[in-house]
Image (spheres, rainbow, N blue to C red):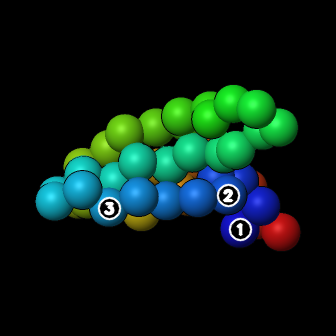
Amino acid sequence: MKRPEYRLRVDDVRVYYDVKEDAVEVLAIVKKSKAQVWLEEKGKRT
């Protein structure tokens, strides 16, 4: 997956983010149950 570059799991929540040179861009914070739908809609494959 090209975007999001990184994923973080926090209990029942998923945080998707990218790291730019000197900043972290949070793309989404979604419940685990909605994570797959978000990735299919918003994620960019390599």
In this orientation, does residue 37 appear? no
Please give left or right for residue 5 compared with residue 38 in the image: right
Q: Label 2: state its secondary structure.
A: loop
**Quarter-wise, where is residue 2 in the image?**
bottom right
- Disc number placed over residue 5 in the picture, else none: 2
Q: Amino acid at mark 2?
A: Glu
Q: Residues within 10 Å of mark 2 (few under 14, many from 20)?
A: few
Question: Residue placed at 41% from the left, 48% from the top?
Answer: 15
Q: Specify the farthest residue to the front.
A: 22
Q: Is residue 24 above or below residue 34?
A: above
If the image is split into quadrants, where does the N terminus sit? bottom right
Marks 2 and 1: in contact by CB < 8 Å? yes
Measured as percent of width and height from the top left, residue 19 is found at 70, 44
Q: Label 3: state its secondary structure.
A: strand
Q: Amino acid at mark 1?
A: Met
The residue that label 3 is drawn on is: 9
Measured as percent of width and height from the top left, residue 38 is found at 46, 49
